């Protein structure tokens, strides 16, 4: 019961955070990836829109429907994304019920991590459900389906979710892992349903392969972005980048403001995740009572490993500190949860309880610093947006608004988007910041 109550309280806190800091104005990348909406294209163009290395997928289709229903209100979008995160948390708690034992005090770790305000950038700064939060929801649903079902339902459902993950944000990192799980299930098929199960697995893999071909059709390897070309770096630099991502998730810098402490903690987390990934991979291909649970742990740990190292490769030009960004944190969570689930199936009661106790106490101790940091950061961005809106409404000059507020909603030197034309589109239709004359106060 206490886990449910805490989940409700943290959900209310998240919605209150949105109420405090969401502002009704498109910001930064939204002016770019909303191109299909500005051009009034069909659902397929919306679904397949590429933004950076990923496509927008099902998350963006639902966002488009929300925009049409709310006159492009990005505050409503922030509430929608917060609701997705709450739903993901509920799914993960349901997934936890598939492990031995009822929900207990240790399971507070799940809502505390999943509803953490450290994800504020994707929720209230540059809302984009497709980037990471919708993939987290799909990954959670995939986990539930893989652990809680068998036969045709598992294989067909997993294939559909894998395809949605392929097209939705960075969810595509789950696809090769799902293929591995199918291979393991193919090898383990036995009994009277062996032929039927293998037929479904063949069909599932073929469906995913076909989706991959569609995904690659028209795909731009540079993401169509103005980001500097991928730079090579010493392998050590990539691992440092990843280590700092784990440290940022828990705001370790608020406790020990020294790079060595950040690296030590980050590398410890990374080693734990890799160890859990390797162990779960081995166990997934062995006959055991926890085969499906190990497959889930393999999926979650492997997903984050692929994601964080891909982020390091793509963003190393920013330096090793470039991974300490709010929007990356949502997809670091699956690895942390994989480690937590791994501890849940440890057979030694004493080791399990001691380890879970340490994790719970640590996560609780991190919360005050996380709370303070996220509120301070979100307040800065809110003031900047509001100042820009007020000046622009008074002058109708982007440059004047930028100079007066010392803030920008989209870089003026980026040729990919005609910001003047898009503001005119919104003005003529009274959408977004033009819907309400007092939008600068929201």
Image (tube, rainbow, N blue to C red):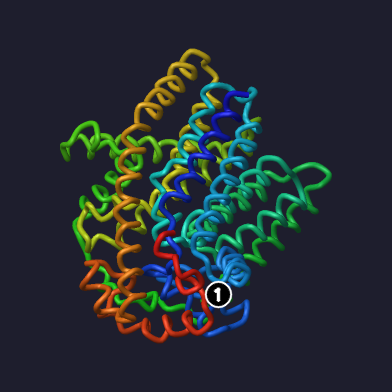
Please say if 140 is above or below 161. above
Answer with left or right where residue 78 lies relative to residue 243. Answer: right
Q: Nearer the viewer, residue 228 or 186?
A: 228
Q: Quadrant of the N terminus?
A: top right
Residue 320 at x, y percent in the picture: 22, 53
At x 25% / y 60%, what residue is drawn?
Answer: 316
Mark 1 nearby-residue class (10 Å; few <14, some 14–19, many ≥20): many
Foreground: 119 or 203?
A: 119
Of all residues shown, which one is farthest toward the top?
Answer: 350
**Residue displayed at 48% across by 79% down:** 426
Residue 220 horizontal/vertical position (percent): 42, 78
Query: Considering the numbered disc 1 on the image, is that residue within a helix, a strand or a loop?
Result: loop
Is residue 273 shown left or right of residue 399?
right
Q: Find residue 276 and report its horizontal and vertical position in percent.
A: 45, 36
Asked if residue 304 can be seen in this view, the reply is: no
Image-quadrant location for residue 416: bottom left
Count of labels shown? 1
Write the residue at 29% across / 70% down: 408
Q: Could you tell me which residue is drawn at 30 percent across and 61 percent down?
A: 384
- Label 1 sits on residue: 48
Q: Image quadrant of residue 345? A: top right
Indicate the quadrant where residue 93 lies.
top right
Q: Nearer the viewer, residue 31 or 426?
A: 426
Q: Quick check: 119 above or below 96? A: below
Quadrant where the C terminus lies?
bottom left
Residue 231 seen: yes
């Amino acid at each position: 019961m206490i886990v449910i109550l805490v989940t409700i309280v943290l959900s209310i806190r998240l919605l209150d955070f949105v109420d405090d800091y969401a502002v009704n104005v498109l910001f930064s990348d939204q002016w770019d990836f909303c191109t299909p909406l500005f051009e009034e294209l069909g659902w397929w163009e919306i679904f397949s829109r590429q933004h950076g290395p990923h496509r927008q997928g099902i998350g963006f289709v639902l966002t488009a429907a929300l925009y049409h229903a709310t006159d492009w209100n990005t505050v409503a979008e922030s509430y929608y994304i917060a609701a997705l995160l709450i739903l993901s948390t509920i799914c993960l708690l349901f997934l936890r019920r598939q492990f031995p034992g009822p929900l207990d005090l240790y399971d507070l770790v799940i809502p505390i991590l999943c509803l953490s305000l450290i994800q504020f950038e994707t929720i209230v700064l540059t809302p984009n459900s497709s980037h990471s939060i919708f993939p987290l929801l799909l990954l959670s649903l995939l986990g539930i389906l893989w652990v809680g079902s068998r036969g045709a339902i598992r294989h067909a459902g997993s294939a559909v979710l894998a395809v949605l993950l392929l097209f939705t944000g960075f969810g595509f990192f789950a696809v090769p892992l799902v293929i591995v799980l199918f291979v393991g299930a193919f090898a383990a098929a036995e009994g009277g349903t062996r032929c039927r199960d293998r037929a479904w697995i063949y069909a599932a893999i073929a469906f995913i392969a076909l989706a991959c071909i569609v995904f690659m059709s028209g795909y731009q390897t540079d993401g169509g972005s103005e980001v500097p070309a991928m730079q090579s770096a010493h392998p050590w630099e990539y691992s440092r980048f990843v280590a700092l991502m784990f440290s940022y998730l828990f705001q370790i810098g608020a406790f020990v403001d020294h790079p060595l402490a950040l690296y030590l903690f980050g590398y410890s987390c990374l080693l734990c995740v890799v160890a859990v990934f390797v162990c779960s991979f081995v166990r997934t291909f062995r006959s055991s009572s926890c085969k499906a649970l190990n497959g889930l742990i393999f999926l979650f740990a492997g997903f984050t490993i692929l994601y964080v190292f891909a982020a390091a490769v793509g963003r190393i030009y920013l330096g090793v500190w470039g991974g300490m960004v709010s929007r990356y944190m949502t997809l670091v969570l699956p690895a942390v949860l994989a480690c937590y689930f791994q501890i849940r199936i440890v057979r030694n009661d004493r080791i399990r309880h001691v380890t879970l106790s340490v994790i719970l106490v640590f996560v609780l101790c991190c919360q005050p610093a996380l709370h303070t940091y996220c509120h301070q950061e979100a307040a800065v961005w809110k003031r900047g947006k509001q100042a820009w809106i007020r000046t622009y409404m008074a002058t109708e000059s982007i440059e004047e608004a930028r100079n007066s507020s010392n803030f920008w909603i989209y870089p003026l030197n980026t040729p990919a988007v005609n910001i003047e034309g898009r503001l005119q589109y919104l003005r003529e239709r009274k959408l977004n910041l033009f819907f309400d004359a007092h939008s600068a106060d929201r």
